[in-house]
Every structure is written in structure tokens, then in C-alpha cells.
């Protein structure tokens, strides 16, 4: 949520009194009266305080100025987006030393009037971010459908360019490395933008010579450039072998429109298939197309499996990190598969779990999304014999290779692995299937299912508690990582775990209890997978 939008809410009465005023985005809200809130910040927060910790400062005005300077510096270093200072009950005005410190360190400082409770600010941010996220997902879904429909028209490349320009609200073009235009749509850019687009097309598709094609497979698969009011992105589409023109999709959009880059990435994958020489696609792509057609007309996955070529497939869930602008096309190239698409909802946890439940809640997140609200999870299918490694700018969750009929379960495993990767701040986490000699093999499936249902019966009517317990156990009881994986505040995790312990009448600090509960939860997972 832009800070300017929050300040425009007349019912809150907020007033910015220091720091930058443009380009500030609030991802969630956190309240703390600690002298050092850094360990409890994830970045992007609006930190709210009533200044109670200032009472601990002794030594007069010089000591207070030094303390507040360090407080502002630490808050900026932790990645907080803004600081909100509440008037009353402790302070009648915002300390002048804090105003000066925030100006020095570039930290937006907002005065929260006495009549506005912190929970009202949190609720406003949560509501605005949730609404924006819904609009973004709706837009992405509509754009994906429009692009897919355009790709099925008689002149698919031109139709995709038109649909893309409409949904990104900008100029789109197919350019050769020498700048030759092979189609465009949308408002014609100024000469400076057109020249920069030609340079980007050469970066991703040329060899540095006049109109030459790249001889090797190296080089970037995407590139970006920024001009006043315009963000340019280029995506390599076709092969770069000898005698081949490597076309690039170039998109010029508003720099403050992150969803446009996700939409462009989807279009780049489609255009890679459309513009690539038919001979390059080979029998594998032909088989994929045949499998898709048969699925669309009602065939079951097991019936189309032979057409896909590879007997086993790995599901990859990927989330773009906040500091990167990597596109779906570049990830598809890196993974070596065209079978990639946005997953418009986060897998494995209930949407909006725990949002706005308690003071200090991270407003506006949805379960398992990690870097929301800007991030969108991508899903890819990769042949099972292909090695999958960490990719710069992305966080990956990887399933074990699985046959086509078991891909729904593999998809859930990849989603779980991605949540673990996000919680652990790891670039890649793989799901590991239990071996044939694991403890689960010693108990029949029916017995395990009956035991699990009896043990977890007190939680049966509360999916949020079951999900929290599952994540908490999988992350070895780590409060912060569980909160990150679920998109809720750590205090909410503690409250839920305490409630679970009461309902189950057990000691969750006991390793034996945790092991038995984990076995029961995994039994329910397998039972759910078997009935999907």
C-alpha cells in the first residue's frame, strides 16, 4: 500500500512530518515499544510506537538525541518502510529530535493522533493490501486467459502482442537484434525509448555485431532498462544458433506496475513457442501439445502420460524475491522447460490465515506467499531426470520426481517445500519422500489413518489449527519461521500452539509427543492425497 494512500485516509488523521514522501510502500504493520525492534522486523513494515521506551533514556537532551538517532538508524537498517509515532498517552507531541533523526536517515515519520488507535492503522493497511492483492490476482488471471486465447488465433504472435499491450497498458514489440520490428502493439514510444528497446533486443539476442545472431547459448535471457516514466524489459524468445534471428519481446510499461512484468513473462513463454521454428520444437513439444489437447477434451492424466515423453516429472514452485525483477520467461529458460505458469493462489494454507487477528499482525499477507503482496508463485513441470539448482533472484520449492498421475501430490509437496524455503530464507528446498524402510512402512495405512483421526479429533473442526501445527512441527517449533510461512504474526502462532496444546491435553515440548503428532499429520496428508 502506498504511504500516500494511507495518509489520504481522513478517518485516520495521519500526518507525515519527516522523511521522503514519494515511492514509499507499506507491506504490513508492526507495533513495538522495544528500544531495539530490529529482531522482530522482516522489512517493509510500518513500525508503530507510542514512545514508551524513551522513558528509559537518561542524561538529558544530548543523550535523547543520540538515542533517537541510533533508533532511527536501526529501524532503517532493518528495512522498515516507515515509523508511526502515537500521540498520547505518553507524549503530547512527536519529539523534535526524532523528527530530525528520521530526516537524516531518510525514514518516513508519521504522526498518529490521539484519537486513532494503532489497530485502526493496522486494519486500514490490511484492508487496502488485501483489496490490492485481489485486484492484482484478478488482473493476472484475466490476462493469462486473454493471452492463451490470443495464442489460439490465426495470427497468434500479433494477437498475443495486442492482448499483452492491452493488459500491461503499454507498448509491446517483437524486435530482432538489429532493431528490425516484427510486430508491435500499443502506443508508439518516443524515439529515446525505441532506441533503448533496440539496445535491449541486441543484449538478449545479438552477438554485438550488426544484426548478427548469437552463436552460443550463453548470455542473458532477459534484460531491463529504465527511462523517465518508463520501465523497459526484454525477453529472449527463439533459439540463438547459427543463421537464426533471435527475436526478443520488448515491453515498455509504467515502472510502478509490478504485475505488468508477471504478465509479460507469461506472454514471453507463449511467444517462445509461437515464434520458435517448428523443427526446433521436436517430438517432445509435439507430444506436449497432443497431451494438452487430449486433456482439454476429457482424457485422464494417466492416459496422456505416454505422450509427454518423460516417465517422471518434477514440480517446482518458485517465488521471485523482492529485490529482483526476474521474469517467468527467464526462469523457464533456466529450468529448461516451457511448462511454466503462475499459480495465482498460494498452496497449502488457508488464504488470509490470521490476518488482522492481533495487535502487531503483519497486515495484508496471504498464507504461504512469503513475499506478498507483490510476489506471485510460479509453477513449473520439469522432466524428472533434469537437475534443478538454485536460481538467482528466485526461491524454489522442489518436489521429488513423480509419474503424471501423482503430480497433484507432487504439487502439494513443492508448495510445502517453497514455504519451508521462504521461512528458512533458503534459495532452494527439496521435498524428500520417506524411504521404503521408514516408520510409516511398519503400520498399515488403515491403522495409521484411524490413529491419526482419533489423536487429532479435537482439531478436526479447525483447519487453521491443523495447518499451524503442521507448519510449526515441520519447522522444528521455530516461532518466527512458522509465522513467516503462514503470513501471520509470531504472537498468533504462540496463541494457536497454546490452544492446540490445551485441546489435545498434551505437552508439545515433549519430543515423543511431537513425533507422534507429526506421524499422525503425515498420515492424514497421505490419506488426503490418495483421495484426490
Image (spheres, rainbow, N blue to C red):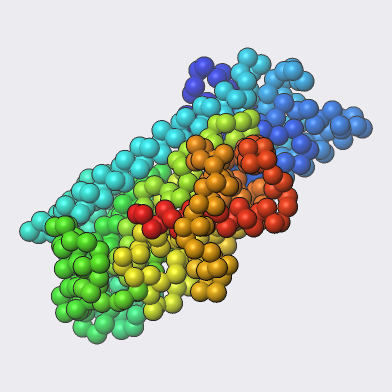
Tell whether 497 sits left or right of 435.
Answer: right
Seen at 70% across and 30% down, the residue is 49
Seen at 50% across and 32% down, the residue is 126
- Work out whether 140 lies above or below 119: below
Indicate the position of residue 218 as horizontal and vertical percent values. Answer: 38, 79
Residue 375 seen anywhere in this rendered image of the structure:
no
Seen at 50% across and 17% down, the residue is 10
Seen at 57% across and 58% down, the residue is 519
Indicate the position of residue 136 as horizontal and vertical percent values. Answer: 36, 41
Front in this rendered view, residue 278 or 461: 461
- Work out whether 256 lies above or below 270: above
Tell whether 386 sits left or right of 116.
Answer: left
Front in this rendered view, residue 251 or 368: 368
Tell whether 513 sits left or right of 433.
Answer: right
Q: Quadrant of residue 100?
A: top right
Indicate the position of residue 425 as horizontal and vertical percent values. Answer: 59, 58
Residue 311 seen anywhere in this rendered image of the structure:
yes
Indicate the position of residue 215 as horizontal and vertical percent values. Answer: 30, 84
- In the picture, the quarter occupied by the C terminus is bottom left
Furthest toward the right, the residue is: 59
Furthest toward the left, the residue is: 154
- Work out whether 240 lies above or below 351: below
- Number of numbered discs present? 0
Amino acid at each position: 500500500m502506498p504511504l500516500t494512500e494511507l495518509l489520504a485516509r481522513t478517518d485516520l488523521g495521519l500526518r507525515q512530518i519527516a522523511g521522503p514522501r514519494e515511492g514509499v510502500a507499506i507491506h504490513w504493520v508492526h507495533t513495538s515499544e522495544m528500544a531495539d525492534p530490529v529482531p522482530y522486523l522482516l522489512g517493509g513494515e510500518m513500525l508503530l510506537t507510542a514512545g514508551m521506551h524513551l522513558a528509559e533514556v537518561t542524561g538529558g537532551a544530548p543523550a535523547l538525541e543520540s538515542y533517537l538517532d541510533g533508533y532511527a538508524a536501526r529501524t532503517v537498517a532493518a528495512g522498515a518502510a516507515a515509523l508511526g509515532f502515537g500521540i498520547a498517552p505518553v507524549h503530547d507531541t512527536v519529539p523534535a529530535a526524532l523528527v530530525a533523526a528520521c530526516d537524516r536517515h531518510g525514514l518516513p515519520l508519521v504522526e498518529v493522533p490521539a484519537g486513532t488507535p494503532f489497530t485502526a492503522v493496522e486494519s486500514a493497511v490490511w484492508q487496502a493490501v488485501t483489496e490490492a492483492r485481489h485486484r492484482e490476482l484478478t488482473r493476472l488471471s484475466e490476462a493469462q486467459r486473454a493471452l492463451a486465447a490470443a495464442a489460439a488465433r490465426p495470427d497468434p504472435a500479433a494477437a498475443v502482442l495486442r492482448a499483452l499491450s492491452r493488459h500491461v497498458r503499454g507498448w509491446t514489440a517483437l524486435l530482432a537484434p538489429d532493431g528490425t520490428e516484427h510486430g508491435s502493439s500499443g502506443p508508439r514510444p518516443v524515439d529515446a525509448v525505441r532506441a533503448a528497446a533496440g539496445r535491449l533486443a541486441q543484449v538478449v539476442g545479438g552477438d554485438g555485431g550488426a544484426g548478427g545472431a548469437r552463436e552460443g547459448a550463453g548470455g542473458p535471457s532477459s534484460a531491463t532498462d529504465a527511462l523517465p516514466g518508463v520501465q523497459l524489459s526484454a525477453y529472449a524468445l527463439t533459439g540463438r544458433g547459427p543463421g537464426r534471428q533471435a527475436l526478443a519481446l520488448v515491453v515498455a510499461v509504467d515502472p510502478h506496475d509490478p504485475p505488468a512484468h508477471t504478465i509479460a513473462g507469461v506472454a514471453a513463454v507463449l511467444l517462445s513457442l509461437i515464434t520458435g521454428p517448428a523443427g526446433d520444437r521436436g517430438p517432445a513439444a509435439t507430444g506436449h501439445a497432443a497431451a494438452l489437447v487430449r486433456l482439454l477434451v476429457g482424457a485422464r492424466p494417466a492416459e496422456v502420460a505416454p505422450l509427454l515423453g518423460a516417465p517422471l516429472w518434477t514440480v517446482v514452485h518458485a517465488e521471485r524475491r523482492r529485490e529482483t525483477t526476474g521474469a517467468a520467461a527467464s526462469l523457464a529458460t533456466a529450468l529448461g522447460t516451457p511448462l511454466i505458469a503462475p499459480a495465482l493462489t498460494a498452496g497449502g494454507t488457508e488464504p488470509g490465515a490470521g490476518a488482522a487477528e492481533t495487535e502487531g499482525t503483519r497486515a495484508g499477507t496471504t498464507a504461504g506467499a512469503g513475499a506478498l503482496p507483490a510476489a506471485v508463485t510460479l509453477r513449473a513441470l520439469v522432466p524428472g531426470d533434469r537437475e534443478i539448482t538454485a536460481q538467482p533472484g528466485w526461491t524454489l520449492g522442489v518436489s521429488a520426481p513423480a509419474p503424471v498421475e501423482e503430480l497433484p501430490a507432487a504439487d502439494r509437496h513443492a508448495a510445502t517445500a517453497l514455504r519451508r524455503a521462504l521461512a528458512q530464507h533458503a534459495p532452494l528446498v527439496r521435498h524428500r519422500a520417506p524411504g521404503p524402510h521408514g516408520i510409516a512402512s511398519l503400520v498399515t495405512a488403515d491403522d495409521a489413518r484411524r490413529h491419526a483421526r482419533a489423536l487429532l479429533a479435537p482439531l478436526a473442526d479447525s483447519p487453521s489449527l491443523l495447518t499451524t501445527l503442521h507448519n510449526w512441527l515441520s519447522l522444528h517449533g521455530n516461532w518466527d519461521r512458522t509465522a513467516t510461512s503462514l503470513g501471520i504474526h509470531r504472537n498468533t502462532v504462540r496463541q494457536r500452539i497454546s490452544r492446540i496444546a490445551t485441546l489435545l491435553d498434551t505437552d508439545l515440548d515433549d519430543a515423543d509427543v511431537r513425533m507422534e503428532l507429526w506421524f499422525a499429520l503425515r498420515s492424514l496428508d497421505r490419506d488426503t492425497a490418495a483421495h484426490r
